[in-house]
Image (tube, coloured by chain):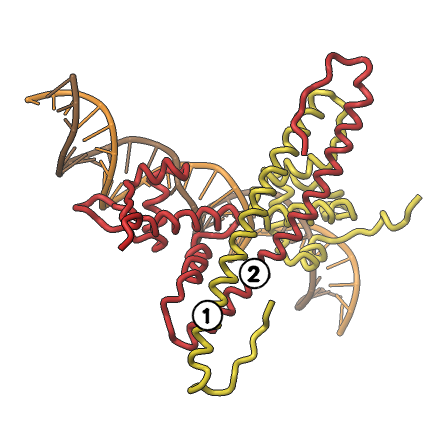
Chain colours: A red, B yellow, C brown, D orange
Amino acid sequence: MNHSESVTYSISELAKVYKVTPRAIRFYEDKGLLNPKREGSRRIYNNKDRVTLKLILRGKRLGFSLDECLELINMYDPATDNRKQLQHFLAAIDRRQALLIHQLEDIKAMQEELTTAKTRCLAALAKQQDTASPPPKHQNN
Amino acid sequence: MNHSESVTYSISELAKVYKVTPRAIRFYEDKGLLNPKREGSRRIYNNKDRVTLKLILRGKRLGFSLDECLELINMYDPATDNRKQLQHFLAAIDRRQALLIHQLEDIKAMQEELTTAKTRCLAALAKQQDTASPPPKHQNN
DNA sequence: CTTAAGGTTTACGTTTACGTAAAGGTTATA
DNA sequence: TATAACCTTTACGTAAACGTAAACCTTAAG
């Protein structure tokens, strides 16, 4: 058996790692996204719980609601072998992938436009370069 | 002068095109993201307004708040030639691009995991294929 | 003329995702 | 023993992004 599976975390440890508040983590549990063991009344998170939290936060970064994140989490774990369920999952996954593709296009478009805007800004700055003080240092792509 | 610039839309026309409610469009105006001309009390949207709405919706799809969308819109139009303003814009653009890069990584990771989940589903379905009814038709990547 | 189809403002309601106390329990250390 | 430093539940508060309804104006068509 693998000992690395027995790593556990308190709620504030987990909160610190992922830069969220304990309140948020409890909220996710309220919504059925997390189900940590208890030790008395204290919540004990294992590695799987930690990964689930990571999935939640990633979903959020991609603009999904918590309900949608729950749907995502369920997709990764089709504990079912019911035929209808599986096909339901497949359909859900397809919808998700379509959404992601759409987001990819959005990102590409936005990146191009940001680059254009950036170029314009830099050009405008260059025009003033002559009369101005020492050239500014600026992180570039 | 270009006549194609004189195309206009009513609020419900625009709403129909982008599948949002007039209420939402008015709300965006309230928040300072849109500033259509008026014809009496009626709002008249031109092509630039339409593009702005498109930007708003794209920003939303990427999970940005309306305030952030406003920031984005302003980036595309640095009407300013103030040096400090320009450098402020550049910094904002860099932050945006960093966010987009992060989202790209999130999407890639999620796509891979969805594909894995899909494979598992399909495998589970295949196991039942023998005993089951006609093979299901299913859209594939 | 009136009825329908659009538009307007004003304003209260709703959902989501937590924030922010309040009130209290349980170790560990000074 | 008391005082932090954690944790717990309960509950009210809040910002964002609209939905929904009311009450009203204004053409266009029958």
The verdict on a common chain for dots 1 and 2 is: no
- Label 1 crowd bin: few (<14), some (14–19), many (20+), radius 10 Å: many
- Classify A81 as above or below A8: below
- Classify A6 as above or below B112: above
Q: Residue at x 44, y 62 (%)?
A: A75
Measured from the top left, where is residue A67 in percent x and y? 43, 56
Q: Residue at x 34, y 55 (%)?
A: A32
Q: Quadrant of the C terminus of chain A?
A: top right
Q: How far separated are the C-alphas under marks 1 and 2?
A: 15 Å
Q: Look at label 2 and name its amino acid.
A: Gln
Determine which residue is flagged by label 1: B121
**Where residue A97 is drawn, which disc sits there?**
2
A2 or A120, which is in the foreground?
A: A2
Q: Look at label 1 and name its amino acid.
A: Cys
- Label 2 crowd bin: few (<14), some (14–19), many (20+), radius 10 Å: some
Label 2, secondary structure: give it: helix
